[in-house]
Amino acid sequence: MSSNNNSDSARNPPAAPARPEFRSVQMQTNDPRYTVQRPQSMATAKPAPAARNDVINMDEFRAGAVPAAMQQETAPGKSSNWAPTAPRPVPAFYPLEKSTRLVEDETPMEVASRLSESLRYMSVQAVYNDEAATANLYTAENVEMHMSLWMTPSTAQQNGVLVELQRRKGDSMVFHRYARRILDAAVGDIEESDLADSVDADKIYSKNGGLFGQINRCGGCLLARLAVCFLLLLLASTTAVVTELKNQDHQEHENAVVALEIAHGLIMKDRMDARQLGLESLCLLTDPAKTGYMTAVLASHVVLLGSTGGVEIAGVTDAPGNESILKDEGPFQEIRETILSLVQFSRIGEDEEDEATSPESESMILLHNLALAVLANALEVVEHPERYIEDDNEDNDDVKQSPRPRLNTQGSEKITEEFLSQSEEFSKKDLLKTLIGELGNASAKPHNATLSAKCIGSLCRASDEAKRRAKELGAKTVVATALDVGVKTHLKLETECQKVFRAMETQND
């Protein structure tokens, strides 16, 4: 029996325990620079094919490096702000945005040169990356876009340059307005000289769509949505669209006061989105083209002086005891102080500085820009309010309206000098010096510089004292430098700097 067992064990030895087995593997791509060879002691490496591949390293792409194998010779073109060395082909499995346009039979340099000049006409700030053939774009409406140039793949039926636009931040409606014009300019379907008016919000503004577009930016806060809806309904009642309310005596100034109170309530909240909505509302209230002449004048006086005491409305303020439209002007004073704090210090009141309220934070940079826009609108209205009276009535010649309440204001020089005096008393800082300093940073922030130049021009045209003070602060040198930036990259900045030069050379009446 034992002999049989021994013979069985000899024929069937016990199984050995399993052990891991190692095999050499060669990993490679078609580009020899990224080939990882397996150890020579284990296998013989095979030479990688030198064929060019459309797959790119995204880390390299973000860093802006262009692989040598993908570089191509480009013919020198005319001087341009953007000179991409060699756009990459579209990467494999990369979904292009719908806002993409193909430009055929042109070199990347020609397309980039035309786009650069078009962006200047549209006054869009652009930060170019020549190596990666990309550009970051920033509009005056605080919309951020990313533009890329791609070469079509070798397998494509049509060869050319692909221009792709992506929205990174901001209003989607504004983005599409700009995207259409930029892509049209890329293929040459629109003249560069026509681009400025095609994206000018003041000229193509839709009263219903533009106003109610703000509701979508309120996020999920139901209370904020209701507040903005109520504010927009009040604003709509002051426009030429709602003629029934215009026929009611003194209705417009009452709606304007209520709208200002709502804007004040939004600004004084501690939420950044509410503050942004409040400042955007003030931008509308101080623009006669969007709200009406009387509303703009009242809002402008509130922004500059914190009071409507200098505004006289026949049949309203001339009644005994009604020297001011509002008995308690505390909210108006807080609006003025908030605007001055944002313009001069990039903060609101005495807020404790943290990550969200730091002057360098994204939220405060946006609020600072909006405050400059409100101030520029207000100064332009008080500089010559009479220009808006005729325009306000031209839109409704076929509608029989009752006479408007007559509106009288103080002279622009008196308002301007009082505003400068009160602002220095409040902030202990010269406002003109702040605006000139903002203009000196035109190369980094051309949109803020444009608004600052607009403010300086209005102040100099309205007041000889402001003009003298601006010259003492070296405004001419700063304006000349900003003008060079505008000539190269920003049409609106160029235009406003030229106006400042003329204002400083012209003697006021």
Image: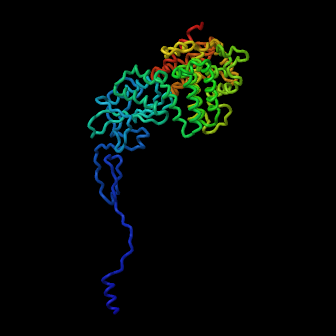
In the displayed structure image, the side of residue 474 where residue 58 appears, left or right: left
Quadrant location of residue 251? top right
Quadrant location of residue 463? top right
User: How is the structure coloured here?
Assistant: rainbow
Out of 333 and 105, give the one closest to the viewer: 333
* Quadrant location of the N terminus in the rendered image: bottom left
Determine the residue located farthest toward the right in the rendered image.
321
Q: Is residue 122 above or below residue 6?
A: above
Q: What count of labels does the image hold?
A: 0
Query: Where does the image place residue 443, in percent across and percent down from the top left?
Result: 51, 26
Quadrant location of residue 267? top right
Query: Where does the image place residue 28, in percent across and percent down from the top left?
Result: 33, 51
Does residue 345 appear in this view?
no
Out of 473 and 292, give the one closest to the viewer: 292
Q: Residue at 63% across / 39% down in the picture?
A: 354
Does residue 171 appear in this view?
yes
In the displayed structure image, the side of residue 86 where residue 360 appears, left or right: right
* Quadrant location of the C terminus in the rendered image: top right
Query: Where does the image place residue 38, in percent across and percent down from the top left?
Result: 34, 56
Query: Where does the image place residue 130, in percent across and percent down from the top left?
Result: 40, 32
Q: Is residue 478 above or below residue 182?
A: above
In the displayed structure image, the side of residue 41 where residue 373 appears, left or right: right
Determine the residue located farthest toward the top in the rendered image.
509
